[in-house]
Image: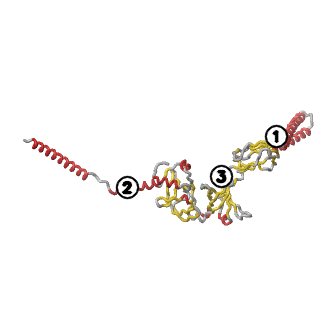
Amino acid sequence: MPRKSLIAGANRNWLLAGAALIAATGVGFTAAKLTSPKSPPATEATSAEGEAEGADHAADGLVMTAERITSAGIQLQPVATGGLASEILAQATVTAQPGGEAVLTARAAGSIARITKRLGDSVRAGETLALVESREASQIAAARSTAAAKAELARKVYAREQRLYEQKVSPRQDMEAAQAELAAAEAEARSANLGARAADVTSDGRYVAVASPISGRITDMSASLGAFVQPETELFRVSDPSKVQVEAAVGPADAARLAAGDQAIVELADGRTLNARVRSITPGLGGETRQATVVVDVTASLPPGLAVTVRLLPKRESSSGAIVIPDEALQSLEGRDVVFVRTAQGFTARKVTVGQRSAGRVEITAGLKPEDTIATRNAFLLKAELGKGEGGEH
């Protein structure tokens, strides 16, 4: 047989074998497809819907630690029922509590010999700020020493008269007279000691110490080295910034709406807000201003004299159910008005219904509860975090 015929026959055999293999593979694939179980369409739809709901929930929540919240400058504020109509906006001033400020003067006339503190320094209760060299101090110290010596002598005389009486050498009236002299001398010694202590006379009797009765910072200072001062001259003023209160002036109509215990919000110039409570309202009106003074207790450390704004929320007018929050707490997320509510892990974006707006405040008629705590200042940072799509801890 010619060689070309043999090659052609071998090629046909290879083509026939390949075609048979392809046919067998197609039959097996078709059989496997027909016999394999199919997933129920309803289950697939349910699973897809569940994944979508989980993604929406994760997108509205942020995990954020308390340290991160503080470092980001995000302010928190608990909400309370009320309304724009019930809020009382008043200008106020931070003042020291009765025990939060002390005016320091020299207890005796003299010249300032030493100054140990400067304006703005911290001081401890009982710490000496200056020494005044005083002639009166030496006189007070001399009177103290004289009274102590008389008391010591009277004690010795009484002890001797008591022994003589017990030995029946001297009469009883001598012992009683010595006892009376001792009582008078001891009373004089106590008076001299109290006078020296009240004047803060040093142990050597040369100086009068100017000491602070409270801990705090020196907020005012007029003492000069070598200056001669009288006892009534103010030398230092010390204030404790943790013992302050806020005094707001309101009209008579607004004063009648308020009561002790009402909630208040103190707004600082830098945008921070502090939760506070109304302590008292003066029963009368000021002679010149014809306004009442509302005293508000705060727990933060603030410098006396600071001007602030106070929002007063009368309890008796909080039945409307509406909640008023700062306008910066309200954010827009995917076309929705939301407020970021504090959770155990961080924040969640909650949809709210907005009512009236006025003077940087917005009324929330639905979506928040009185026990909620929300992000106010820098709340836009939380919106930006959600925009990044990060689901991990921040």
Q: Return the x and y of residue 226 as percentages of the image width and height.
A: 79, 44
Q: Front-most of 71 and 285?
A: 71
Where does label 1 land, which residue? Answer: 206
Residue 316 lies left or right of residue 26; in this view the side is right
Q: Amino acid at mark 2?
A: Ala
Q: Which residue is mark 3?
A: 302
Left or right relative to 281: residue 11: left
In contact (CB < 8 Å): disc 1 and disc 2: no
Residue at the location (50% across, 59% down)?
Answer: 332
Is residue 282 among the parts visible in the rendering?
Answer: yes
Where is residue 253? Give x, y as percent: 67, 66
- Amino acid type shown at disc 3: Leu
Distance CA(mark 1)–CA(mark 3) = 39 Å
Q: Local crowd at mark 1 within 10 Å, few (<14), some, or many (≥20)?
A: some
User: Which color scheme does this rendered protein use?
Assistant: secondary structure
- Identify the residue position indicated by label 2 in the image: 48
Residue 315 lies, with reference to residue 242, above or below; the image says below
**Looking at numbered disc 1 in the image, what kind of residue is underneath it?**
Arg
Q: Quadrant of the N terminus?
A: top left
Secondary structure at numbered mark 1 = loop
